[in-house]
Amino acid sequence: MGKEASFDAMDHVDIEKRETERLEKQLTARVQNRECAVLNVSQKGVLLETEIPMYFFPIAESINFELEINGNWVMLTGIVKWVITHQSHSRIGVFIKRAPIQYVEYLKEIYS
């Protein structure tokens, strides 16, 4: 396990409000200390897939999760935009308004 990144206000930048392409990425994440998957990323958000039931993720509520980026765990906070539940898992669309610099640098890397 990599060390957790700090969630200091100085380590964050605002993400522009504009439509951006989603990139299919299989990344590891943790929500409520349980491992889950990231199916795609964009400059505005992520799509999480988890076995945690959907009622744990009310629409328009804040969600904290960790994302493994280049071997390091980075804490992110977002807003639940939508949830779809299947028999064995939930998919959660998360909007990220402010992102840690590690996430922004990762996006620059994959978008270039």
Image (cartoon, rainbow, N blue to C red):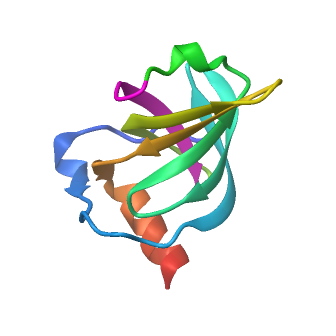
Residue 64 point in image, percent of width and height: 42, 29
Whether residue 86 sits left or right of residue 1 in the image: it is right
Asked if one can make out residue 1 in the rendered structure from this viewpoint, the answer is no
Q: Is residue 34 above or below residue 76?
A: above
Answer with the quarter of the image where residue 76 lies: top left
Q: Residue furthest right?
A: 87
Left or right placement of residue 34 versus residue 4 in this view: right
Q: Is residue 68 magenta?
A: yes
- Residue 73, x across and y down, in percent: 53, 42
Q: Is residue 84 left or right of residue 104?
A: right
At x 40%, y 63%, the residue is 43
Q: Who's the residue at 61% across and 39% down the image?
A: 29
- Residue at 32% x, 57% y is 101
Q: Main secondary structure of the magenta part?
A: strand
Image quadrant holding the N terminus, namely top right
Q: Is 79 in front, or is 33? A: 79
Q: Is residue 40 above or below residue 22?
A: above
Q: Quadrant of residue 25?
A: bottom right
Residue at 59% x, 41% y is 2
Look at the image and give the residue range highlighted in magenta: 59-69
x and y percent of residue 91 in the render? 64, 37
Q: Is residue 103 above or below residue 98?
A: below
Question: Residue 33: horizontal and vertical position, in percent?
Answer: 60, 20
- In this rendered view, identify the residue nearer to me: 91 or 65: 91
| Image quadrant in which you'd find residue 40 | bottom right
Residue 111 vs 102, above or below: the answer is below
Q: Is residue 73 magenta?
A: no
Number of numbered callouts drawn: 0
